Amino acid sequence: MGKFRISTPASSAGIMRFNDVKAGGLQIEPQHVLLFAVIVIVGISILRMIIG
């Protein structure tokens, strides 16, 4: 093993760089995903009550 060890802070180990990259395609915010999931769950629950 070498004498020197290189360590990076946890905040700069790829997490910070992820937000800098703007990839093409559909950009969806986390709040919209959660709202969609809640709407689907409520919709399925209502359908189960109606259908029986």
Image (cartoon, grey):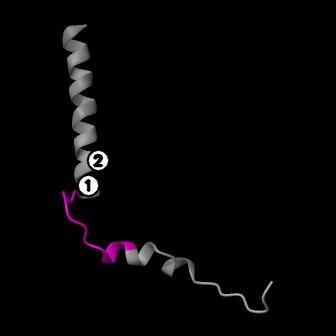
- The amino acid pointed to by label 2 is Leu
Please state the horizontal and vertical placement of residue 47, each as a whole percent of the image.
20, 18
Please state the horizontal and vertical placement of residue 50, each as a whole percent of the image.
19, 12
Q: Decide: few, some or many residues near mark 1? Use Cα within 10 Å; few <14, some 14-19, many ≥20.
A: few
Establish if 13 lies above or below 25: below
Dividing the picture into quarters, in which one does residue 37 lie?
Answer: top left
- Secondary structure type for disc 1: helix
Bounds of the magenta span? 18-28
Q: Decide: few, some or many residues near mark 2? Use Cα within 10 Å; few <14, some 14-19, many ≥20.
A: few
Distance from the alpha carbon under mark 1 to that under mark 2 = 5 Å
Point out the residue furthest to the top here.
Answer: 52
- The amino acid pointed to by label 1 is Gln
The residue lying at 78 percent from left, 88 percent from top is 2
Closer to us: 33 or 50: 33
* Magenta segment, prevailing SS (helix, strand or loop): loop
* Image quadrant containing the N terminus: bottom right
Point out the residue furthest to the front here.
Answer: 1
Establish if 9 lies above or below 25: below
User: Mark 1 = which residue?
Assistant: 31
Closer to us: 31 or 14: 14
Is the residue under label 2 in contact with that under label 1 (CB below 8 Å)? yes
Residue 45 as seen in the image, left or right of residue 9? left
Q: In the rendering, which numbered label is found on residue 34? A: 2
The residue lying at 71 percent from left, 87 percent from top is 5
Establish if 19 lies above or below 4: above
The residue lying at 57 percent from left, 83 percent from top is 9
The residue lying at 29 percent from left, 47 percent from top is 34
Dividing the picture into quarters, in which one does residue 4 lie?
Answer: bottom right
* Image quadrant containing the C terminus: top left
Establish if 9 lies above or below 27: below
